[in-house]
Amino acid sequence: VPNDAVPASQRGSWTSFLKSIASFSGDLSSLTAPPFILSPVSLTEFPAYWCEHPDIFAAIADAKDDESRALAVLRWFISTLKGQYTSRNESMGSEKKSVINFPPRNVPTHLTRNRPLNPVLGELFYGKWPATSTSSSSQGTTTLLVEQVSHHPPITAYVIENKTKGLRLIGHNAQKTSFSAGSIIVKQIGHAILTVSLPNNTKVEYLITLPRLRIDGLWYGSPYIELTDTSYIVGGGYVSTIEFKGKGYFSGKSHSFKAVVSPSSSASSSSSSASSTPSSYTSYFSSNNNNNSNSNSTPSNSTPTTHTIDGTWHTTSSYTSGKFRGRPFHDVSSDHHHHHHGKTGSKKVEVTAVGGGGGGDGDGGGEEMGEFETRRLWRDVARGIREGDFESASREKGRIENEQRQRRKDEQAAGTTWALKHFVRVESDPVYERLGKLIKIVPPTEDTYVFQDNSPVKP
Ligand code: CLR
């Protein structure tokens, strides 16, 4: 029975919402969702998903050669996917209900908290993941800085850094949504550049592109995310091609992926313009490996080789060809999930970064948040959503949106524009262009947001 997961009282509203998205073309972010699917978490908090395995991130810096570094970057990327794409469903499970006092009665948990808050221009989010006591202190601290750099269309920029390890990830993202065959298709726009500073004072850069999402299960009232298409990680002498498939492909399981990690034809971070396509799918399906002997930038005593990795990104994956064939690659269940220290209200508390309630009434001392910091800005809206008081949630939301409209009007009248705090937009990204050539990336260039390193950063 369609809609069976939706309580009778909400069925009409869910069905008319589905009808409205089915006949909608354009930007889904501008579509009004029924209140019971609103999430109390703003999209500016989502980059925190990249940070929730700080030990796997830090391990990238410990790799001894280009090949193991490429594998370490891929392992870290895969380790973040479960949190990014399934944790919100899981956090709605019963074990957390008591902690986050959500959802309101009579609303099925998996229907709620799917529609994140649409950030305002200049919205900020800061996070911090100190080295864990179980890990050696040399792991360093991972910090996150996020700024909403555009409202129309919504674009979020972020910097993730581990200074001790010489790691810095800078990226921005936006989404283009459409509706097809009963599912919402979300194309992710934007990219990230990971810079690894090596002890010999050289830098290795990786371009990371993002998968496409399909939101299935809408008609049945239990939406979930499946990843589709391909992501690339390019740089450091290697190209990783990560192909995503859902139920019925590959192994038949949902959340499946196949990754091919192969040496790129040009030397790693040099600005060489060689652009032959990496031996990705062809080499996988003809299952040849150990066949490439290009030299690469970091001295290494091993010959660069190709690896394929197969599995599901929310459970386990293993090497299926290459010199590690048969060995495990990654096991999500042995990961430690590290929540960061966020701030709620005016108090500093330890919280689940995303999807875990968007804060709560924590206690403990701490500094004041600025008025544009996401959990202060949306505090009353989030409280309304969490407590099922949708009237006050939408009243507060309306207040914030009106204030924003007024600000834009005032700026226009004064002939000024909003000044971003941490980023400057530029028309093109030379690193994207150079590394993108290796995978014939489309589009060949993309605008980007340059981090202003000297801007005052809150701890
Ligand atoms: C944001 C960037 C993160 C990964 C990520 C995860 C979930 C995505 C989110 C991104 C964008 C917004 C999103 C969300 C899942 C559902 C939500 C697509 C890509 C849409 C707007 C909600 C639609 C509401 C349905 C329940 C009908 O790194």
Image (spheres, rainbow, N blue to C red):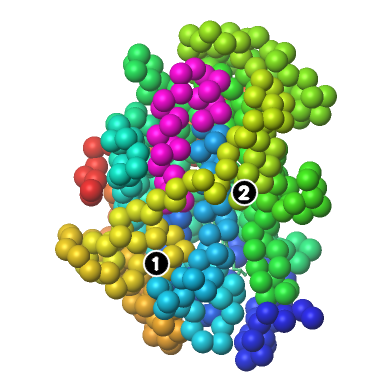
Viewer-proximal residue, 129 or 380?
A: 129
- Residue lying at 64% horizontally and 86% vertically, measured from the top left: 7
**Type of secondary structure dominating the magenta stretch:** helix
Q: Is residue 127 left or right of residue 15?
A: left
Amino acid found under the numbered disc labelled 2: Thr
Examine the rendering and report whether any part of residue 317 can be seen.
yes
Residue extent of the magenta highlight: 47-72
Q: Is residue 385 left or right of residue 280?
A: left
Q: Which mark is residue 83?
A: none
Amino acid found under the numbered disc labelled 1: Gly
Q: Is mark 1 within 8 Å of ligand 1?
A: no
Q: Which residue is mark 2?
A: 315
Q: Percent from the top left, x then y, of residue 423?
A: 35, 43
Examine the rendering and report whether any part of residue 441 can be seen.
no
Viewer-proximal residue, 288 or 114?
A: 288
Marks 1 and 2 sit apart, C-alpha to C-alpha, by 26 Å
Asked whether residue 62 is drawn in magenta, I would say: yes
- Residue lying at 34% horizontally and 77% vertically, measured from the top left: 380
Q: Percent from the top left, x then y, of residue 322?
A: 69, 22
Disc 2 packing (10 Å; few <14; some 14–19; many ≥20):
some
Q: Please state which of the two labelled residues, at mark 1 or mark 2, is closer to the viewer.
A: 2
**Secondary element at image label 1:** loop
Position of 128 relative to 31 (above/below): above
Q: Which residue is mark 1?
A: 358
- Residue lying at 53% horizontally and 53% vertically, measured from the top left: 84
Position of 374 relative to 161 (above/below): below
Q: Earlier in the sequence, mark 1 or mark 2?
A: 2
The quarter of the picture where residue 444 lies is top right
Callout 1–callout 2 Cβ contact below 8 Å: no
Asked whether residue 373 is drawn in magenta, I would say: no
Q: Percent from the top left, x then y, of residue 158?
A: 40, 46
